[in-house]
Amino acid sequence: MKNVFKMNTKCPYCECKLDGHFNSKDGNDKKGPKDGDYGFCIKCGEAFTFIKGQATKIDMETIDEEFKVELRRITDAWLKMKAQESVK
Ligand SMILES: [Zn+2]
């Protein structure tokens, strides 16, 4: 995949290696995640934030309801994808 920023961090939940960051807004990411950007682990289905280039757990108490709804939508889409993969 082109335009994937190479990085070296681990998912703070499942500890799998996260080696690429893809900016979903414009599909072009030459600089990588900034502090406070969000990411999503497609292995375990958890969202995280970035601090100094490292994936870090999100403090759910600090995010607003609108973003919680968005996270639920992302998680639902991920669950649907995993369900479809399991019947292939
Ligand atoms: Zn993970």
Image: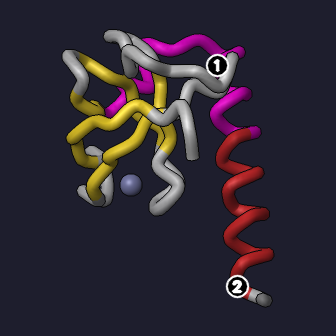
Identify the image quadrant of the C terminus: bottom right
Q: Amino acid at mark 2?
A: Ser
Q: Give above or below for 85 relative to 57.
A: below
Q: Is residue 65 magenta?
A: yes
Q: Position of residue 42 (x, y in %)?
A: 53, 55
Give the secondary structure at mark 1. Answer: helix
Q: Earlier in the sequence, mark 2 or mark 1?
A: 1
Q: Amino acid at mark 1?
A: Phe
Disc 2: CA contacts within 10 A as few (<14), some (14-19) or many (>=20):
few
Quick one: 86 or 30, which is closer to the camera?
30
Q: Is residue 84 magenta?
A: no
* Residue at image mark 2: 86
Q: Is residue 47 left or right of residue 25?
A: left
Residue at 68 percent across and 18 percent down: it is 25
Q: Give above or below for 9 relative to 29.
A: below
Q: Position of residue 56 (x, y in %)?
A: 27, 31
Q: Nearer the viewer, mark 2 or mark 1?
A: 2
Residue interval drawn in magenta: 57-73
Quick one: 63 or 56, which is closer to the camera?
56
Q: Residue 21 lies in what quarter of the image?
A: top left
Q: CA distance from mark 2 to mark 1?
A: 29 Å
* Residue at image mark 1: 67
Quick one: 75 or 21, which is closer to the camera?
21
Q: Please, which residue is most extreme toward the bottom here?
A: 87
User: In the image, which disc is placed on residue 84?
Assistant: none
Magenta segment, prevailing SS (helix, strand or loop): helix
Say whether marks 2 and 1 touch (CB < 8 Å).
no
Residue at 65 percent across and 25 percent down: it is 27
Residue at 33 percent across and 48 percent down: it is 18
Residue at 29 percent across and 59 percent down: it is 16
Q: Is residue 57 left or right of residue 60?
A: left
